[in-house]
Image: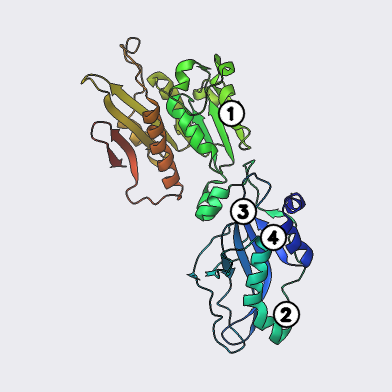
Amino acid sequence: MFHALVSHNEDLNRLLVKGYAIALDGNHLIVRDIPYLNDKGELCWGAIVCKMQSPDNKRYTQKNHQIFFAGSHPHGLDGKPVANLGGGPHRLPLPDSPDVVVQRSFSNKPQSGGYADHFAKIESYVTILCGPAMERYGASPLTFNAVETIVGTSVFKFKDTLTTLAEIGDLSAKLKNEVVALIGLGGTGAYVLDFMVKTPVARILGFDRDLYHVHNAFRSPGKLDEAELDQSKAEVYQNRYEGFREGLSLVPKFVDESCAEDFRDVTFAFVCVDKGSSRRGIFDLLVKLGIPFIDVGMGLDRKQGPINGTLRATYYEPANAEAMLERNLAELGDREDDEYRVNVQIAELNALNACLAVLRYKQIRGFYLDENYFNHMLFKVNDIKIHGEPE
């Protein structure tokens, strides 16, 4: 993989051949063994880190004239800090390269306005940062200590350049060992799936035995392929998303208390079903297995003419699941008029319901800040407000 990537990028190959200690951590280029002088004139070793971006998952271009540096501020032979470096203190977590602790950023823009490629950028910064150490101690950044493996494994079949650009690798890493189950792949469940596919969770298990019909296309993400009609929802979404990531297993199956083996490794679940009787069996299973889960639901009607109603996302954690069940926040049985009730679902409200659920999940896992710890959230359509209730 390392050599395949280098073979598609001449600038990275030039760095390797010249002897730089390069490594590729996700979408970061790391150059270790960078000699510099500290404020006492002593020889120190640091590392340069650059963001990389890719238009096609093969070729990588350098993003700007900025770098990140693992080390203190380099000094010159005169004992003064190296000038014209700009930037300042900065933190850039690299979960897969814990030995590289970024402490600051530097910004030295060339007179041409930008660097042609990674080779030109690294060469320029090495001259600025390493020059004094090379002159005083004869130290060299050309150590030929390249790490010829790409650090870190990914479930994605494409480089996750978004996480790199946003500098949230440490937060995304909080999710990587998760095994998430999605029960119900209808309107809201389809959007939950779409959101979760783009997270680095280790595995996603999906369950829905219903068929995919035309109306499903109007309340779920993605384009409609006529060949998908009257096929299993699980099969439709498996085919749509398996080209994006590994660890995806969607099956046409009804979930009830007898499905414990299917949930053996599950660490979190989303319940996205609209029948109370189905929800009852699912709840019993998840509570028995001690799996935390979020249940979603919506109640919409046209009693006032325009559509009005409420969206719900309720979190059941193992420690208080029984107490939450006693509050009757979700329907666990079928009403007598269900056969005649119009099931109003609209794509944007399905998506919003899924957003509430996934946002809450990511709060629970430490990805988003959580100052209220709401276990029960309601969104009212008529006033566009979210009402949250704690445990």
Q: Earlier in the sequence, mark 1 or mark 2?
A: 2
Secondary structure of residue under mark 2: loop
**In terms of sequence position, does the residue under pointer 1 or pointer 4 come before the other?**
4
The residue at the far bottom in this view is 78
Q: Is residue 359 left or right of residue 384?
A: right
Task: Name the residue: 58% across, 69% down.
Answer: 110
> Dot 3: few (<14), some (14–19), or many (≥20) neighbours within 10 Å?
many
Dot placed on the residue nearer the N-terminal end, 3 or 1:
3
Q: What amino acid is labelled 3 in the image?
A: Asn
* Element marked by disc 1: helix
User: Which circle's residue, 2 or 4, is located before the other in the chain?
Assistant: 4
User: Which amino acid type is shown beneath numbered disc 4?
Assistant: Ala
* Residue 51 location (% of width, % of height): 59, 58
Give how far apart the Cα atoms at labels 2 and 4 are.
20 Å
User: Which residue is tagged 1?
Assistant: 240
Q: CA distance from mark 1 to mark 2?
A: 53 Å
At 76% from the left edge and 71% from the top edge, which residue is drawn?
143
For label 2, the residue is: 139
Q: How far across and down, in percent of the image, does residue 71 sit?
A: 58, 73
